[in-house]
Image (cartoon, rainbow, N blue to C red):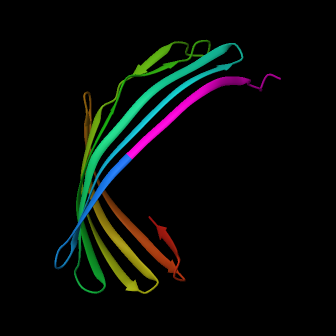
Amino acid sequence: DEGTILLAGKINWSNLTSSIKWRHYFDNGDLNTVVHFSGFTNKINAGAMNSAVASDANIASCGVNSVYSAPINDKLFYKVGLEYQHLFNKPMKVDISGLQGEGTYQYLHNADETSIFTTLSHQVVNWFSYNISLRGSWFANKSDHFGALDPRLSLIFKIQNSHIIKLH
């Protein structure tokens, strides 16, 4: 059948994550800081009919996130935070011999992301609250950089005591 693709191959996959969290309590708020690392590797060798696909990736990210949160009164809370993340990898090689666009492609990506953000949370009634947030981000790698300013609104509905619906 012309629409059928027979695929045979091997996938090696691994992921390593770790994090350290520190929380400091102040008289009227608290500071949460998380340092994290995540590493991911895969090797894919597969064949489809008269063609071959191969990929080799080794990607890792590390960063820090620090958020200060405090109540304004019994219904209003605010958060202010800073986040930094670095993404790095060895060259990822993708070989698509025998397929359209035949050839070998290599990607090398190292990037930095820095963000600052603030959130105002209002508990209107026991079953409904909303968050108004503003996040400024800056992305950079060797060849490109750009920034973004994102406003956000979240509506949070509490159903009974164990279920929450959050709309962004």
Residue 96 horizontal/vertical position (percent): 56, 17
Query: In the picture provided, is 161 more to the left or to the right than 143?
Result: right
Q: Is-magenta flag for residue 58?
A: no
**Left or right of 120: which side holds 128?**
right
Q: In this view, does 20 lie above or below 109?
A: below
In the rendered view of the protein, which quadrant contains the C terminus? bottom left
Q: Residue at x 24, y 85 (%)?
A: 73
Q: Give the answer, above or below, for where 52 lies relative to 34.
A: above
**Residue 14 belongs to the span the image colors magenta:** yes
Q: In which quarter of the image is residue 34?
A: bottom left
Tell me the magenta residue range. Answer: 1-17
Q: Which residue is drawn at 30% across and 42% down?
A: 62
Residue 159: % across, % down: 54, 80
Task: Label the magenta part by its dominant secondary structure.
Answer: strand
Is residue 60 or residue 72 the one in the foreground?
60
* Residue 98 vertical placement versus 133 (above, below): above
